């Protein structure tokens, strides 16, 4: 009985050895494949190949009978009519916005009066619950009856101090809400990337941002940035004008997704001498080819600044194809920012100031991430991305509605 056992064990050994030899080549192939997949060049080539495949006709539509293709044409014609109705709908929405614009403006003017200390709100106007007040009420409810009087007294004393009742700590009275718009810009990632340190003192003078919807062709809107008199420039209002197209493109009607911004123009800022933060002086050394002498020259170049927002790249008339890729990326981000300021920042400014609007958006993003498919939560590695361009990184956080 022992010999068969030895034979079976030897056979098993040989079988395992043979299996190891058989899988050796497979293991080497897998290792080579894994190594190749770590090569950025191979990944880039693979990605290009996949991109060329996506959207390619499978041949199914071409293989359909003529009578079916004829019906598809009828569906496309109906689709074009649907798009035309959609364009009419958005035009009606624009008309409604024009109708309600005065009502919004009336409230936004009240907001400006409070921000700039032109008007102090009444007790009735301030009658809105806050988290701090809710916490005080909860503390009072939780305290034993013997300590409730003490809690109330403490609240009164703290309120007196906040109102400036303590003569030793009384500071200069704060008017309005200082740095309101600057705080919003710093709270919102899309805008904070534009604001440089040298922009902040200027933006403390920003008193209001308003939107004017155009009631005549070309359709669109204008953003107005209202500044109090300051040492940096002589203008009191800086403008950014956006032109929009509500109709579908006649050359590509099925690409229509609603109104789109097609052009924007800024304004000239009349800077006071030595206060222009959009330019900087750099010194360069130049060497004379013949004599070998070296001289230092000063050159003026563009500097990073929020105020470059008012000097966008020019769009050639009638031909979008003439815009280079860099200008197209800048304009794309500019359109996103202009739309975001109009649709979100201006109507909900106080919520962006307090951070409540930002927290709400973060929760929405978290909800979306929970339902994401496997692999989407992997950390992005820009160093191994062959398509990563640092010069375009500033536009990566632009929020699309």
Image (cartoon, grey):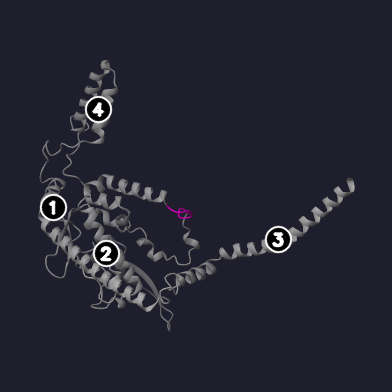
Q: Which residues are magenta?
A: 372-378
Lower sequence index among marks 2 and 1: 1
Lower sequence index among marks 1 and 3: 3
Task: Look at the picture and state if 228 lies above or below 139.
Answer: below
Lower sequence index among marks 1 and 4: 1
Instruction: Decide: few, some or many residues near mark 2? Use Cα within 10 Å; few <14, some 14-19, many ≥20.
Output: some
Report the Cα–Cα distance between label 1 and label 3: 73 Å
Q: Which of 32 and 182 lies nearest the eye of the viewer?
A: 32
User: Residue 335 bears which disc, if any?
Assistant: 2
Q: Is residue 373 magenta?
A: yes
Predominant SS of the magenta segment? loop
Instruction: Decide: few, some or many residues near mark 4? Use Cα within 10 Å; few <14, some 14-19, many ≥20.
Output: few
Q: Which residue is mark 3?
A: 23
Q: Residue 18: image x %, image y %?
A: 77, 59
Q: Residue 218: image x %, image y %?
A: 16, 70
User: Residue 137 bears which disc, if any?
Assistant: 4
């Amino acid at each position: 009985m022992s010999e068969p056992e030895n034979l079976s064990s030897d056979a098993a050994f040989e079988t395992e050895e043979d299996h190891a030899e058989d899988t050796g080549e497979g293991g080497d192939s897998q290792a080579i494949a894994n190594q190749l997949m770590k090569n950025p060049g191979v990944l880039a080539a693979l990605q290009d190949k996949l991109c060329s495949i996506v959207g390619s006709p499978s041949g199914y539509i071409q293989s359909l009978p003529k009578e079916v293709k004829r019906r598809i044409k009828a569906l496309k014609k109906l689709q074009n009519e649907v798009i035309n109705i959609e364009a009419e709908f958005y035009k009606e929405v624009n008309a409604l916005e024009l109708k309600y614009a005065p009502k919004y403006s009336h409230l936004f003017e009240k907001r400006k009066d409070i921000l700039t200390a032109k008007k102090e709100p009444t007790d009735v106007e301030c009658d809105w619950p806050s988290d701090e007040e809710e916490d005080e009420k909860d503390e009072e409810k939780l305290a034993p009856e013997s300590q409730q009087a003490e809690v109330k007294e403490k609240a009164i004393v703290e309120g007196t101090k906040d109102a400036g009742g303590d003569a030793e700590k009384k500071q200069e009275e704060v008017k309005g809400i200082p740095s309101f718009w600057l705080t919003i810009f710093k709270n919102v990632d899309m805008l904070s990337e534009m604001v440089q340190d040298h922009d902040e003192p200027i933006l403390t003078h920003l008193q209001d941002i308003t939107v004017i919807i155009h009631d005549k062709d070309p359709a669109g809107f204008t953003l107005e940035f209202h500044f109090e008199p300051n040492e940096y420039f002589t203008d009191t209002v800086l403008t950014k004008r956006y032109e929009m197209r509500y109709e579908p493109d006649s050359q590509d009607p099925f690409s229509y997704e609603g109104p789109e911004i097609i052009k924007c123009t800024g304004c000239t800022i009349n800077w006071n001498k030595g206060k222009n933060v959009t330019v900087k002086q750099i010194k360069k050394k130049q060497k004379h080819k013949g004599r070998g002498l070296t001289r230092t020259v000063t050159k003026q170049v563009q500097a990073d600044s929020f105020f470059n927002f008012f000097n966008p790249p020019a769009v050639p008339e009638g031909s979008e194809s003439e815009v280079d890729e860099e200008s197209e990326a800048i304009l794309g981000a500019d359109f996103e920012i202009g739309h975001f300021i109009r649709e979100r920042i201006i109507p909900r400014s106080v919520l962006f100031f307090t951070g409540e609007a930002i927290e709400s958006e973060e929760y929405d993003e978290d909800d979306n991430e929970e339902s994401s498919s496997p692999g989407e939560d992997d950390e992005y590695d820009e160093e191994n991305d062959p398509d990563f361009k640092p010069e375009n990184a500033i536009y990566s956080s632009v929020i699309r509605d």
